[in-house]
Amino acid sequence: MLLFFTLGLLIHFVFFASIFDIYFTSPLVHGMTPQFTPLPPPARRLVLFVADGLRADALYELDENGTSRAPFIRNIIMHEGSWGISHTRVPTESRPGHVALIAGFYEDVSAVAKGWKENPVEFDSLFNESKYTWSWGSPDILPMFAKGASGDHVYTYSYDAKREDFGAQDATKLDTWVFDNVKDFFHHARNNQSLFSKINEEKIVFFLHLLGIDTNGHAHRPSSRDYKDNIKKVDDGVKEIVSMFNHFYGNDGKTTFIFTSDHGMTDWGSHGAGHPSETLTPLVTWGAGIKYPQRVSAQQFDDAFLKEWRLENWKRLDVNQADIAPLMTSLIGVPFPLNSVGILPVDYLNNTDLFKAESMFTNAVQILEQFKVKMTQKKEVTLPFLFTPFKFQVIQDLVASVLTYPLSHFVGYLLAFTLGIEVLVLSFFYRYMLTAGLTAFAAWPFLTRLWTRAKMTSLSWTFFSLLLAVFPLMPVVGRKPDISLVMGAGLLVLLLSLCVVTSLMKRKDSFIKEELLVHLLQVLSTVLSMYVVYSTQSSLLRKQGLPLMNQIISWATLASSLVVPLLSSPVLFQRLFSILLSLMSTYLLLSTGYEALFPLVLSFLMFVWINIEQETLQQSGVCCKQKLTSIQFSYNTDITQFRQLYLDDIRRAFFLVFFLVTAFFGTGNIASINSFDLASVYCFLTVFSPFMMGALMMWKILIPFVLVMCAFEAVQLTTQLSSKSLFLIVLVISDIMALHFFFLVKDYGSWLDIGTRQLLACTAWLFMYISASPNRLWMLTDPGLDLNLLHAIRACISHYVIVMSMTIFLVFLNGLAQLLTTKKLRLCGKPKSHFM
């Protein structure tokens, strides 16, 4: 048994490693020959403004008074340049957005190795190809393009990272800093001959990264006055910079200006997924080589934006975000970035047909060069007989072989698979299927003899199953913070604690004082958590930032949440309740609305599950019923007490998998990053820190998971079943689900549809290990496979990492559950011990 278990574990680790080799290997190749248009460019210099987090509608729309909040930019659209919408790709984050703009390629999956903050593989960019580039802005963005640049010609000027504070009073200072430093730079250049000569060269770039809008959007939402006022200040700043450039260069007409954004933002102040508010960004260009405004009588677009923005008479030219990179390179005459996949938007160019044709040809050759190098590299590491285009004649053969079986057998296999797995599979795609499953769970006792044997337990199971079934019907994203619900959850925890403390005081055990002290400590922790949530919310609304004392309490609560339960009694229900109280204190600090109630309801159902499983086991006559109040978690378990597997154990394993899925998707969709609101971590920190914020949000996801795993430990103990036995059943279910998901890959539809299918195929492995069809993995790496499919798989990588980073830790979470339930620490300096 141990040998097979170890072998299975090893195989799944190999599959895990293969996923990283397939999905997390950088698609970038090197060794291409630089390509550039062999004709004189229209501009000597280019100025790139990137307003981080600016939505297209926020810039183009008119306010309630019918006036533009960006009058200078709107005047450009109507009288000087060309405009349109830049369609970004998912993930809509700052790093991949800027890479697409400046380097011309989309998300590089290997960036996971750098925490998504920079690219671990060197890549070419507009800045690298320029003669000189000067950039001002965020320390999170600028170093990424300077680090990989060849030579010493990319200069960066950044403010301190501590300025990026979501709780700050005025985030527009980030943009003001950029504008002021650019002005100082040019003022200094007049008195510095060396610098003056450099900025008068050709093929130079000036990059202004403006982070204030994004910061205000996260802190106050895009509908806030802060966000909209920031747009006006950016518009004023751009106007001043343009005037300064024209004056400095004597209105020589050789400057091109491009104003755009890296990504948009949802109404609730997040970004990362594929909602139109996140993927639609503005693009306004003017100056040397850019077409003047084109008046039209009609335009063919499926949306109603033109009429809403009152721009229906000015020709709109939409592009993909990566197309902006080849546009900029052609305007100043530098080679196209070697890794660019962007297609030159020639409609923006005000030049001869010959220049446009040469530029398009150069663009095509540059993209073809990448394909040739990639094909050569693939051929060198692939056996000759395997280096063939993928044939779909394979799928047809599979179908033909299946149809050779008798129809009755085929239908029987199909029904068995559908009835056992399909509910779980569908719940990954449609959250409301969890509601359907929990409703079916609620009816389960009435379809068995449980109702006649344990009426109260059956009613409790039905009630809490139906109550939990409400959560998947609640909105995933877009919910507004509702602190009253968080406070309500805290009050319920306090009420429950009061009942437990009262029952403890009635006991006459020798450990009553120690147990009472532990519970009172946890009650105090819950009260402090409620206070911190309320006071932090009030402080941020007054724009006074995060109080230091609140921050200290929050981190102390988090640190103690995994230690305090170890001080409680190892008696089954007392230990589980102690774990719930400790984790709920932390969960309250990470909650902004209805999700604060979720772990509480889930835990109630878990308590009932433990009772009802014992009733079921007694009903089947497998073993005698033990009093739950007498059962203790044990570090060392007597294997002679274990029994053999029964058919009903498959149902128990299925329940576990279903509860794990519910724990993940009950209040959100882990396939979408914007299911999580940064406001969730404001009790811990408000200064932007992707690693810390990501870790806190990940722990918020895992808390319900830990609660389920601890309950599962209790189920195994009360039903006298070996954990390895149930473990293997869960593994089989997970593997079947993984295979099911992998064959649901598709390369059409919205990004969320594509990403969800890719991601959920991997999430299925989360419920013990990873498994997949090796043949399918080989097909995904075949050079003849549709490139759109490969790109669709890579596009979901930022979300994929969230799940995959947790995959291997499920085994260790099982160990964490054992630790939380079996370990016992003593107060007053007494040594720790294990209860037998």
Image: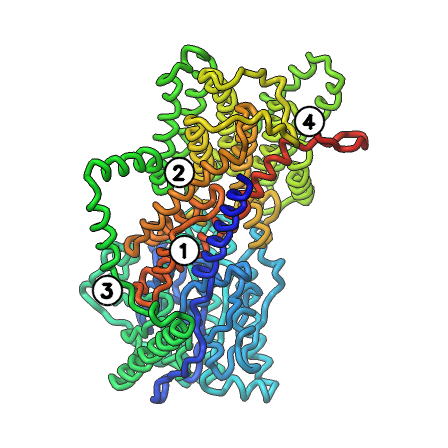
Say how the picture is coloured.
rainbow
Amino acid, disc 3: Asn
Amino acid, disc 1: Cys
Q: Quadrant of residue 562?
A: top right
First reached walking from the N terminus: tag 1 or tag 3: 3
Image quadrant containing the C terminus:
top right
Q: Residue furthest right?
A: 829
Q: Residue at x 61, y 61 (%)?
A: 161
Question: Disc 4 on helix, strand or loop?
Answer: loop
Tag in front: 3 or 2: 2
Q: In 3D space, how far apart are the residues under numbered discs 4 and 3 (Cα atoms)?
A: 81 Å
Q: How many marks?
A: 4
Tag in front: 4 or 3: 4
First reached walking from the N terminus: tag 3 or tag 2: 3
Circle 2 residue: 475
Comparing 282 with 431, the one in front is 431
Circle 3 residue: 313
Q: Quadrant of residue 410?
A: top left
Few, some or many C-alpha atoms within 10 Å of disc 2 (few <14, some 14-19, many ≥20)? few
Q: Give the left or right position of residue 109, taking residue 276 as reference.
A: right
Q: Which mark is residue 836?
A: 4
Amino acid, disc 2: Pro
Q: Residue at x 73, y 15 (%)?
A: 509
Q: In 3D space, how far apart are the residues under numbered discs 4 and 1 (Cα atoms)?
A: 47 Å
Q: In 3D space, how far apart are the residues under numbered discs 1 and 3 (Cα atoms)?
A: 37 Å
Amino acid, disc 4: Met
